[in-house]
Amino acid sequence: MDRDGSTAETLATFVGELTYSDLPSEAPPIVQQCVLDTVGVTIAGLDEGAGRVTCEVDRRLSAQPSGVPIPGTDHRTSPTNAGLILGTAAHGLDYDDVGPSMTGHPSATLVPPLLAVASDVDSVTGREAITAFVAGYEVECYLDSALTPAHVQNGWHPTAILGPFGAATVAAVLLDLDVTAIRNALNICVSLSSGSSANVGSMTKPLHAGHAVRSGITAAYLADGGFTASEEAFDHEEGFFELFSGSDAVGEATHRLGDTWGIIEDGGIFKKYPSCYYTHAGIELMEELKAEHDLTADSIDRIEAVVSEGAKLENPAPATGLEAKFSNHYTIACALLYDSIGLDLFRDEALPNERTREVGERITVSVDPDLEYTSFTTELRVTTTDGAELRRRKETPPGYPGNRVSRDELHDKFSDCVQTRLRRDQAEALLETIEGLDEMDDIGRILTVS
């Protein structure tokens, strides 16, 4: 789709005209898996940290007996606050999917508005939900393609600044807004988009996703009520592109709406480990080298992890579970010391960890200047105590195209995530319900099953 008019007009026209029959045949099963994975990590995210606190605060301030149900709890609230809770919980454990085409976490800002708004309208079919999800995904990819890597280098968290537009798009489709209202919703989001990477490793990082979802839902409802915004909110010299890239990015979007599909190119990149995706190649490399060479903590003299600038996550001794998720030292040490990398290793009670700290002190992280800023490529250089040198490089972390997480692994992850809040029969019923997403007559059932 060629750009015609302002950025907001281009996006609104694409969204307003998109139908289920326009989608590539590969898209619906990918969206179904995105919903399954996100619902699972959201339920797990309500158990602790940012997700738990957000839900508890909303229960105190805004409970609505007839509102949107929060899965795995008895709490109900407004669509906007449900978006805040579900978005925060979805990203709370950093176990949610990633999308390189939008340089962040797409489903944490797309599934929550699906569920929140669907519970506030008469009914939303599975096919309508899939169309809304894909529309939101492509909008985020389009905007990211005009910014990458400038917004990341300038300290912005892509999920936070792109998420409002994806969430607003989802809500707009479910509310059946016309092109003018969609355009207004997107332009409103320009003034609601924010989120500093300085808060990575704290509860505020997952709040970025929740805030983005609430902002997007709010913008869509406002636009539905006749609220307006500047026609040039994206393209103005003080508009979205200039503010977040620091340069004239107008017209430089490389993502071709309707011709290239981010949902297909990324294909649903689901996390195997509950930590920042930049750490995953290093974890898998360490697991492979350990298995092949019988490595132990006692047999290793030093380890060097060579990564991209964006993946230079240094923290030899994290003090909290959230900090640990963003530490190459900790995650590589865990891969060496433990048989599996699960949620338990990233809970606060697991830190500080003297064993990982001791190994972490032997790990250095350096940057390969030839790698793109946001590359996931990682090389481990391991020197053993007897002088042997081992090297291995990985360009595709687990979950990435060419190294996919299997359907069985995704199901096992879902079951593990929901086990603390759902009985086994409830979990199985929820999984079966989501697996039939494209034939569902009302996706609001997803929240009532759980």
Image: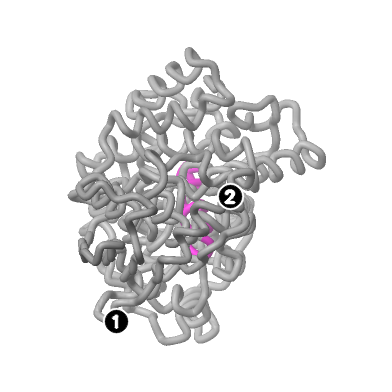
**Which residue is under mark 2?**
217
**Residue at x 59%, y 70% (from the top left corner):** 198
Indicate whether residue 405 is drawn in magenta: no
Front: mark 2 or 1: 1
Residue placed most toward the observer, 73 or 446: 73
Question: Helix or strand or loop: what does disc 2 sit on?
Answer: helix
Rendered position, 446 above or below 131: above
**Residue 149 percent across, percent down from the top left:** 38, 75
Residue placed most toward the observer, 118 or 33: 33
Question: Helix or strand or loop: what does disc 1 sit on?
Answer: loop
For residue 208, the mark is: none
What is the quadrant of the C terminus in the image? top right
Image-quadrant location for residue 37:
top left
Indicate whether residue 176 is drawn in magenta: yes
Residue 220 visible in the snapshot: no
Q: Is residue 422 left or right of residue 440?
A: right
**Residue 335 percent across, percent down from the top left:** 38, 49
Q: Is residue 99 left or right of residue 292?
A: right
Count residues near mark 1 (Cα–Cα under 10 Å), then give few for <14, some for 14-19, many for 20+: few
Residue placed most toward the observer, 366 or 198: 366
The amino acid pointed to by label 2 is Ile
Magenta: main secondary structure: helix
**Residue at x 52%, y 66% (from the top left corner):** 315
Q: Which residues are magenta?
A: 160-177
For residue 369, the mark is: 1
Q: CA distance from mark 2 to mark 1?
A: 40 Å
Rendered position, 446 above or below 238: above
The amino acid pointed to by label 1 is Pro
Of labels 2 and 1, earlier in sequence is: 2
**Residue at x 60%, y 65% (from the top left corner):** 199
**Residue at x 37%, y 61% (from the top left corner):** 102
